[in-house]
Image (cartoon, rainbow, N blue to C red):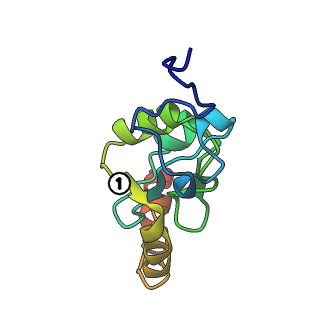
C-alpha cells in the first residue's frame, strides 16, 4: 500500500484563472457586473435627434440648454441597448471609451463652445415663416 498515489486537497489549475489580485469583486461569476468601458457623447458633433434617448432612456437624455444628447447614467441600460443607440446614431457621435479617459473627456467638454440647436439668431426668420 505504500505505492498508492497521494491526493492533495488543492484544486486542479488550468492556468487560465486570473490571479486573485486581479479580482475586483464585480465579476459576473461573483454575482456582479463590470463594464470595461464607459459611454460618451461628443456634443460638438451631436445633432440632437434624440434617437439615443428614445432607445436607451436610462443612459441618455437631451440636454435642455443646447439640445444635445448627454449620458446621465453609465449603468442606466443593458449594454446591448446602449450599443443599439451607438450603432443607430446618424452622426456617429457616441462611443465606448476607457473609464480612465472619461474624466479627461468630461474636462475637455467644459472648454468647448457648443451652439444651441434651437432657433439660431433672434427668431425673426421663424416669426416671418409663421406670419406668411
Q: Where does label 1 land, which residue?
A: 93
Q: Nearer the viewer, residue 33 or 74?
A: 33
- In percent of width and height, residue 36 lies at 47, 50
Q: Determine the image quadrant of residue 70.
A: bottom right
Q: Is residue 65 left or right of residue 85?
A: right
- In percent of width and height, residue 2 lies at 54, 20
Q: Is residue 65 left or right of residue 39?
A: right
Q: Answer yes or no: is residue 116 visible.
A: no
Q: Which residue of the protein is positioned furthest toward the left in this rendering?
A: 91
- In percent of width and height, residue 37 lies at 46, 53
- Vertical comparison of 122 with 60: above or below: below
Q: Nearer the viewer, residue 129 or 52?
A: 52
Q: Answer yes or no: is residue 114 visible.
A: yes
Task: Give the residue drawn at x 55%, y 43%.
Answer: 53
Q: Which residue of the protein is positioned furthest toward the right in this rendering?
A: 31
Q: Nearer the viewer, residue 83 or 92?
A: 83
Q: Determine the image quadrant of residue 129.
A: bottom left
Task: Give the residue drawn at x 35%, y 54%.
Answer: 93
- Vertical comparison of 104 with 102: above or below: below
Q: Which residue of the protein is positioned furthest toward the top in this rendering?
A: 1
Q: Which residue of the protein is positioned furthest toward the bottom in this rendering?
A: 111
Task: Give the residue drawn at x 61%, y 62%.
Answer: 64
How many marks the image carries: the answer is 1
- Vertical comparison of 40 with 54: above or below: below
Q: What secondary structure is marked by label 1? A: loop
- In percent of width and height, residue 120 lies at 43, 69
Q: Quadrant of the N terminus?
A: top right
Q: Nearer the viewer, residue 63 or 60?
A: 60
How would you rate the neighbour count of disc 1 (Cα within 10 Å): few for under 14, some for 14-19, many for 20 or more?
some
Amino acid at each position: 500500500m505504500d505505492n498508492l498515489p497521494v491526493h492533495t486537497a488543492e484544486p486542479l489549475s488550468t492556468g487560465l484563472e486570473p490571479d486573485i489580485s486581479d479580482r475586483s469583486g464585480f465579476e459576473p461569476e461573483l454575482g456582479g457586473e463590470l463594464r470595461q468601458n464607459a459611454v460618451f457623447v461628443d456634443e460638438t458633433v451631436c445633432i440632437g435627434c434624440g434617437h439615443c434617448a428614445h432607445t436607451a432612456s436610462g443612459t441618455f437624455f437631451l440636454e435642455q440648454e443646447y439640445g444635445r444628447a448627454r449620458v446621465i447614467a453609465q449603468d442606466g441600460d443593458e449594454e446591448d441597448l446602449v450599443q443599439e443607440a451607438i450603432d443607430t446614431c446618424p452622426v456617429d457621435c457616441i462611443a465606448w471609451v476607457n473609464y480612465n479617459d472619461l474624466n479627461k473627456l468630461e474636462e475637455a467638454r467644459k472648454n468647448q463652445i457648443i451652439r444651441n440647436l434651437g432657433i439660431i439668431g433672434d427668431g425673426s426668420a421663424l416669426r416671418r415663416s409663421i406670419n406668411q
